[in-house]
């Protein structure tokens, strides 16, 4: 029985390595389109394998994939694929060991931040990546934004989007493959925290004072600005949840896509942020969770 299980594990490992190799070949044939647009897809072969097998044998498979990148990828592909393999490995181990969704999301987000941070801070010159033009455009509209805050905001947003994409697709794949995974909470069960609303008021007050009355050091200004940005992203999330909850309760499920899309449209998402703040402070959904 044990030999049969080991043979099956080795066979499945070879299969996911073959799938990963095909992904690398497709990436090369289409001018690196895969790594430039959806590099996080490289995480899924090892993620699915790690979700079903012990850590020791999964580590061997992950090492084989990393070596496989030398054969079918260039320098940039090595970096994107290796970081994706690491993220997929950790998430798959979390599924196998039955971690909570929050823990898996946290680990994935931290690794994604490290990955994008390395791209912008260390590898920008090698990759030929230049955000100066984007930063100049942002400064025309928001002249108080510092370069470090801009880069931090870009890293945060890209890492957050990558984390959400990996998590949602992993949940869907695991359900289809009948792999146990903690269920995602219903929209009505997602409750905003009142203390986040009060923190928002404090951060906005500090930010306003730093731009007018009180002059902090540049480091403190950057910290306050970055904290305010992250806090507004959290409120935007709660605003999306509120709009989705309204669509579901009034039986307008076809509009949930626009409830999500509105939270990502600059300018329009200010309404979502205000709704998120009000939901935190006064509880717009007083019947939530019922």
Image (tube, rainbow, N blue to C red):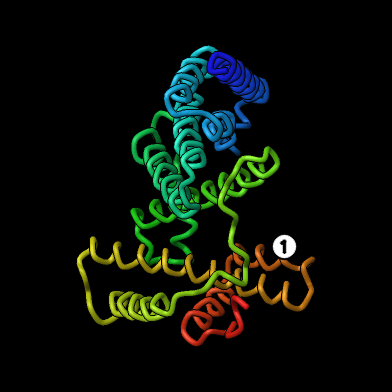
Question: Residue at 63% of width from left, 78% of height from top?
Answer: 290
Circle 1: element type: helix
Residue 76: in sight, yes or no?
yes
Question: Residue at 65% of width from left, 73% of height from top?
Answer: 243
- Residue 126 vs 226, above or below: the answer is above
Residue 193 x/y as whole percent: 44, 75
Which corner quadrant of the image does residue 190 belong to? bottom right
Which corner quadrant of the image does residue 14 belong to? top right
Name the one closer to the observer, 288 or 132: 288
| Quadrant location of the N terminus in the rendered image | top right
What residue is disc 1 on?
Answer: 257
Q: Find the residue positioned furthest to the left.
A: 217
Residue 55 x/y as whole percent: 44, 29
Name the one closer to the observer, 274 or 240: 240
Residue 261 x/y as whole percent: 66, 63
Question: Residue at 68% of width from left, 68% of height from top?
Answer: 259
Residue 5 x/y as whole percent: 57, 20
Question: Residue at 63% of width from left, 45% of height from top?
Answer: 169
- Residue 204 vs 58, above or below: the answer is below
| Mark 1 Cα shell of 10 Å, populated few (<14), some (14-19), many (≥20) | few
Residue 21: in sight, yes or no?
no
């Amino acid at each position: 029985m044990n030999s049969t299980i080991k043979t099956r594990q080795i066979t499945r490992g070879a299969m996911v390595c073959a799938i990963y190799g095909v992904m690398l070949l497709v990436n090369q044939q289409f001018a690196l389109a895969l790594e430039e647009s959806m590099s996080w897809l490289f995480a899924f072969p090892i993620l699915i394998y790690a979700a079903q097998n012990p850590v020791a044998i999964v580590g061997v498979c992950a090492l084989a994939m990393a070596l496989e990148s030398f054969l079918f990828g260039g320098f940039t592909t090595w970096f994107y694929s290796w970081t994706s393999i690491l993220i997929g490995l950790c998430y798959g181990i979390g599924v196998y060991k039955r971690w909570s969704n929050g823990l898996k999301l946290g680990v994935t987000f931290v690794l994604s931040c490290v990955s994008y941070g390395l791209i912008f801070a260390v590898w920008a010159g090698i990759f030929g990546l230049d955000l100066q033009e984007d930063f100049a455009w942002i400064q025309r509209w928001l002249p108080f934004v510092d370069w470090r805050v801009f880069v931090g905001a870009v890293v945060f947003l890209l890492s957050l989007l990558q984390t959400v994409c990996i998590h949602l697709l992993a949940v869907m794949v695991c359900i289809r493959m009948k792999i146990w995974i903690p269920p995602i909470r219903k929209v009505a069960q997602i409750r905003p925290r009142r203390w986040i609303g009060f923190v928002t008021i404090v951060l906005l007050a500090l930010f306003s004072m730093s731009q007018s009355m009180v002059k902090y050091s540049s480091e403190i200004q950057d910290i306050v600005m970055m904290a305010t940005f992250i806090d507004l992203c959290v409120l935007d999330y709660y605003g999306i949840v509120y709009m989705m909850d309204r669509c579901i309760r009034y039986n307008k499920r076809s509009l949930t896509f626009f409830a999500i899309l509105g939270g990502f449209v600059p300018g329009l998402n200010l309404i979502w942020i205000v709704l998120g703040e009000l939901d935190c402070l006064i509880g717009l959904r007083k019947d939530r969770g019922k």
